[in-house]
Amino acid sequence: MRQLPIEPILRLDGITAAGGVTDVTFHVAEGEIVTLLGAGGLDVLAMVAGLRRAQRGTIAVAGRILTRTPTYRRPIGLVRAGQDLFPHLDVRAHVGFSPGVSRQRVREVMERLGLMSLADRLPAALTPEQRLRTGLGRALAAVPRLLLLDDPLALLPPPRQAAMQDLLRRIAEEDGLAMLQATEEPSRAFGLGNRIGVVSQGHLMQIGPPQEVYGAPVSLAVAIATGPVSALGGLLIEHEADIGRLRLACGATIEARLPRRLPIGQPCVIALRPELIALARIPAAEMGEGAVPARLIEALFCGDHIRLRCRVGLDDPLEAASEVIVIRPSGGALPRPGEVSLAWQASHAHAFAVALP
Amino acid sequence: MNRRRLSAVALMAMLLLVALAVVQFAVLTMPAMLVLAARPASEWAGLWSQAVSATVVECNAIAVVTSVLLGLPAALAAWHWRGLWVLVSLLVAPVLVPVALLAGTELSSQGLTVLLVSHASLGLALGCGCALVALQGVEPGLLEAAACAGVGPLAAGRRVVLPLIAPGILAGVLLSGASSMMLSLVSIAMGPPAGYAALSGLTASPILAVIGIALLLCAVVLAAMTLLRR
């Protein structure tokens, strides 16, 4: 295998698979955790593991090109949500499953993951978290350079997800292990990844730090994949640098960030994050420039937050197209339906071009 | 061929299979039972000593050994390479042949080679069939997990697959032994002087040959349909 003069543990260059992803290029450095968000992420994971064949492109792990290397010869570990444990082997046998793993190593890994008291248990007698720890132990015992995480936290309740994310981050940091996670759930992606890559329609649309991907999505698909958004229709009437002024269907004029340069008159969709919208029971003119009149239709208590369903434009007949969701921290009485005004910072609204039918 | 047409062909094959089973019961199993029932009680005494003769033990042994040594690899091959399903369904087909028909064949030939081959084919069919059923319960994800843990295909088969399908292999061994014994007993019971002539006459008739071939064809068609619908 040819040696590459590169630093990252994992480097993908133009990976393409039939019916799957197209031209995916990124890298994962030592100690870094990258999460692929979206349905195509699992395809990439399978190709890195060698479980699926890449038609084109190069996969290199620790400087060795492994595109055609069989799975069992790759220096990787795969962790799933715990459903791939061998039913006939106990926890100790799982941790020592890989060839060449010494008893001392098995003991070290089991102690680190809190598995010593479960050593003689079969998978059927384990909780989902214990099963996950056992699968993690099996992968770590062989000292891989790259750990592949196939949405491992999917079966855990949110509080336990946070605990396991802490554990995985600690392992990546202490062992200098590169990790690549695939999931379709934004909360699990942002909770673990140092960088987030959004895979949509077979393409890696955007990859970067979590705040950047969430706060400045490059497309509507990325915005939708990374969290809840409300979409408003509008027409670009002028722009200055990366901020554009758009006229909504209800007649109000707002400002929004333009990820790409667009021509004047371009129909757009404006994506808004529900937690970044201000809502007040005062007229829009009093709320300030860029505020739009709306009607609060429904308020729903959701435990840690309140979900407010509003319709922008008091007389707009296109109800579905102009609905906006606002999220507020819970506390106090639920707001009653009625006329309100909505406002947001221009940098928190993102305008994307839409093709005319 | 679209799925609806495949379903229709599979349904027709299954109906034909049931019809053939009814016909073979009427023209073969029932007459055989009548032949047995007509034997005088004095002839039954010597049958049990024949049942533990060296030839019968040899036949049982060859059936059991074949079920493990040939049936298991055939099942593993069919599980791994789906394209071999039709071929393997041919191997499993002897299970469908009525025991009385096989016994009649043995009586007609009177040769040790034919005897051993018929028992071996039964053992192969049952061993392969039981292992295939057991393999359906093995998640492909387990082999992926083994590969990602650095374990090669052969070691994964030995350390993961074989322990999981061990009950199926054991079932194949027991079924092969029991079926081989049943086949031997039927052959002995139907043997000379009373039953032989009647049964060899029955098995030599063209209609039974057609039934046997049609049963095998139906089984192959059903297996092919199952494969194509995946």
Image: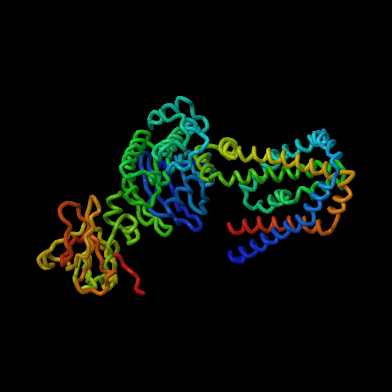
Q: Residue at x 79, y 41 (%)?
A: B185
Q: What percent of the width, then of the height, locates residue B191?
A: 86, 44
The vertical placement of A225 against A152, above or below, is below
* Drawn side of residue B128 relative to residue A211, left or right: right
Label total for image: 0
Q: What percent of the width, then of the height, locates residue B107?
A: 85, 46
One can see residue B57 in this view: yes
Front-lying residue, B31 or A246: B31
Q: What percent of the width, then of the height, locates residue A344?
A: 19, 61
* Drawn side of residue A217 relative to residue A27, left or right: left
Q: Residue at x 44, y 40 (%)?
A: A62
Q: What percent of the width, then of the height, locates residue B77?
A: 65, 46
Q: Quadrant of residue A114?
A: top left
Q: Quadrant of the C terminus of chain A?
A: bottom left
Q: Residue at x 81, y 53 (%)?
A: B31
The vertical placement of B48 against A266, above or below, is above
